[in-house]
Image (cartoon, helix red, strand yellow):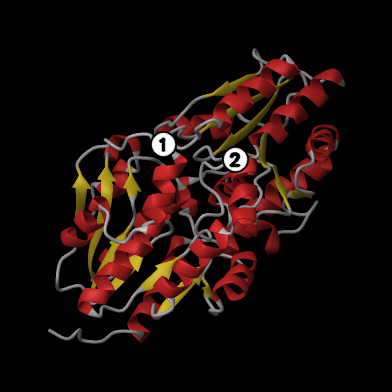
Amino acid sequence: MKIGILVWDLSIRGGTQRQALELALYLKKNHIDVMVYSYTLDKTKCYDNLIDQLPIKSVQSDQKALEESNLVKLRKAFSDSIEEYRAFVSLIDRNINILNPHDQKVYIVANLYKSKYATPVVWNMNDIPYKGGSLNRFEKCLMRLSGIEYLLNLRTRRMIENFEKIVVLDKMNRGSVRSIFKIDPEIVRSGLDINEFKFNGKDIDKTNIRLFSNGVIYEHRRIEDTIIAVGILRKRGYNISFNYAGSEKYAGSYKEKLIKVINKQKLNDYVTFHGSVVENDLMDLYRTANIFVFPNYPQTWGLAVFEAMALGLPTVITKGCGASEILSSRKNCMIVDVNSPSQIADAVVDLVENKELKDRISSQGRLFVEKNISWESFGRDMLRIMESLKQTRPA
């Protein structure tokens, strides 16, 4: 059995990229013939330690994608014959037995390939297409009111209805897939390597409190909620700062909005964007932080949440992320309502002022990850699904 894993962009560090590469590595270690295909590849900006261990083919050897207008994005969304999709399809070997696209855009490539070669497809759909990305709230509202979102969802449904399996990370997305596409997906939780994250349950220095978040910058990250929470806490007398690490490649006008929020809150000296960082620098930011904040909404899963918990970093998340489905507030994390900077601020105060609470969340968070989250279990479940579909493709 030869498995082809598709991921569009391997020139950024994000949950989708990590998930696809870790799965490929698991399959390789278990003697499964696997090939990773991408449109763009720049290992220096992605997970080079994983990429160096894997066979990878890409359309572009480095990132040359240009900024696109929303009109161009919509045209691409409706078109099956654009040049970049064709180029991607032609990249894929003919002897693939199962195609495994991860998240956005590549499911279109999988559909085109399947229509030519009748290859079974298992789609890891981390997010509903067209729900996130770089569109702002006004543009999303316009898409809904104009009927464009309905047409895009209808087109996606027709494109994926012949896929053998759709895999999602959480109940939230499973419900959305059932409602929008009338398809029943399977839940497989993403993982991490616990050995990469050494527990560090340090005390919080009340004189210099450091918040941290990371992830490719999109509007649904709701970074502004953490920024506003920092403003609230500084007005209460707390010496607090906020570091954010993550590629700004897809940020668009959202980054400008964040700068305006920072200026309005007069927090220029207390909020720092580090951009995309290498693994060692990311770990340093984790280790020097006191509290991890994940205000994302709507957000599938949240790999960074479990990375922070594995390190013993007390974590504040919202009810709008998939990770909240399996976590317990005030036991292994702090869970707050979505779009609520004031609740984020209150949760931070609780952790700063209540050492017993902070220590419990720190230790129980680590224990939860040890028992429940691993790339081994993710890979094992994905391989089980793929083996159930194993067949010889017609010549």
Residue 319: percent from left, percent from top: 74, 54
At horizontal 72% and vertical 53% (from top left) the residue drawn is 332
**Foreground: disc 1 or disc 2:** 2
Horizontal side of residue 79 vs 153, given as left or right: left
Residue 80's mark? none
At horizontal 59% and vertical 64% (from top left) the residue drawn is 371
Disc 1 residue type (three-letter): Glu
- Secondary element type, mark 2: loop
In this orientation, which residue lies closer to the viewer: 92 or 73?
73
Cβ–Cβ under 8 Å for marks 1 and 2: no
Residue placed furthest toward the left: 395
The reply to whether residue 335 is in sight is: yes
Residue 279's mark? 1
In this orientation, which residue lies closer to the viewer: 355 or 64?
64
Name the residue tied to disc 2. 136
Horizontal side of residue 196 vs 177, given as left or right: left
Image position of 43 with respect to 271: above or below: below
Image position of 280 with respect to 127: above or below: above
Q: Residues within 10 Å of mark 1 (few under 14, many from 20)?
A: some
Q: Quadrant of residue 261?
A: top right
Residue 28: percent from left, percent from top: 26, 65
